[in-house]
Image (spheres, helix red, strand yellow):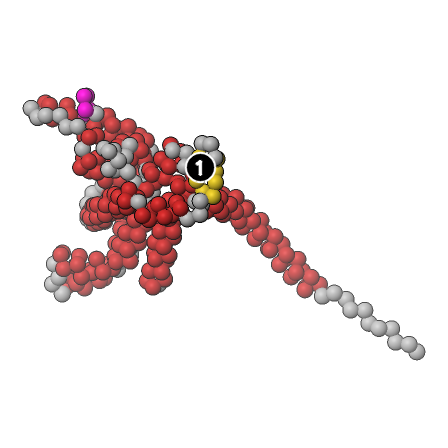
Amino acid sequence: MLEVPAVKTPDVNEMTRRRIAMRENLRGWGIIGPIILYLIIFTFIPLIILFRYSFTQDDLFKGTFFVGLANYVTIFTNPDYYMLFLTTILIAIFTIGLSLVLGMLIALGVTGPIRGKGFYRTVYYIPVVVSMAVVAQIANVWLSYNDGTFNNILVSLGLEKVAWYKSTFWMYFWIIVICVWKGLGATVILFIAGLNAIPVEVYEAAELDGADGWTRFFKITLPQLRPMLVFVMITSIIGAFNIFEPVQLISEGGPDGTTKVILYQIYNEAFQNGNYGMGSAISVVVLLILMALTMLNMKFGEEKD
């Protein structure tokens, strides 16, 4: 009698697991797929176009033509671009220094035993959400030579008017003040988060050992906040390379181009001079600098963990 081979029936549980796994995969791709598509369209493709344009120049009669590394050679050999980076770094140094000091003082104040903490925490964050265009317009009203608020006050005190826009010092001063004021709220929030993460028991033990306020600050608070300080410094440097609105809307790079910063020059080259190649080349250099700073920040974060 012939034996009929047994028909292998599919494992129902295995099929169910496969269906569930397939549905989960499809759900996952449904979530990350649009994100990947967004990054390709709005990040990777523009970056490729940016790199391509950085090796070209534009001419009214010749159009766009390939020039190799000429734009990069100009950036690294022309003294005007040295001054451009120097101005950006100078503004960054003062902005970061003031932001760290004021941010720390405010954070220490609002985390201490004071009344109305909620009110103060709202007030110092308001500049973050105010449009820079509004801030610049207010600044222009204050700094106007003929009928500006500050000059009216000086005249009422019997003093001479100040030509704010013609002074390199005062243009630096007001750009730095506005940048500090605009970003101070975010700095304070980061410091508050760092301060709240320090165990209260550490302060109590130090106080029992006879440590005064300054000793607790320098021996406990600052060392514990070191990772946050480094993070704030690196992100502030990155932010300094993105300064544009105060220069564009207040000083316009003046007087005599002394307050031109990197982003303002990119705007001028690409949209004022029509030289998209040079504007793209400067953008690539800035991009590489920001990528290096971001990697440094990530590396420091890994070491901290």
Residue closer to the observer: 265 or 185: 265
Q: Is residue 73 left or right of residue 38?
A: left
Residue at point 13% right, 61% down? 211
Whole-percent x, y for residue 24 in the image: 59, 55
Q: Main secondary structure of the magenta part?
A: loop
- Specify the amino acid type for callout 1: Asp
Residue closer to the observer: 76 or 104: 76
Instruction: Single out the residue that lies furthest toward the left.
Output: 158
Q: Is residue 106 shown to the viewer in this render?
A: no
Q: Quadrant of residue 292?
A: bottom left
Q: Is residue 58 left or right of residue 205?
A: right
Residue at point 24% right, 30% down? 139
The local crowd at label 1, few if under 14, some if 14 to 19, many if 20 or more residues have their Cα within 10 Å, is some
Instruction: Single out the residue that lies furthest toward the top.
Output: 147
Query: What quarter of the picture does the N terminus occupy?
Result: bottom right
Whole-percent x, y for residue 283 in the image: 39, 44
Residue at point 10% right, 23% down? 155
Q: Is residue 125 left or right of residue 158?
A: right
In the rendered structure, does residue 36 fall within the stretch colored magenta? no
Q: Which residues are magenta?
A: 145-149
Query: What quarter of the picture does the C terminus occupy?
Result: bottom left
- Circle 1: element type: strand
Q: Does 221 sit above or below residue 113?
A: below
How many numbered badges does the structure rendering display? 1
Q: Which residue in the structure is indicated by mark 1?
A: 58
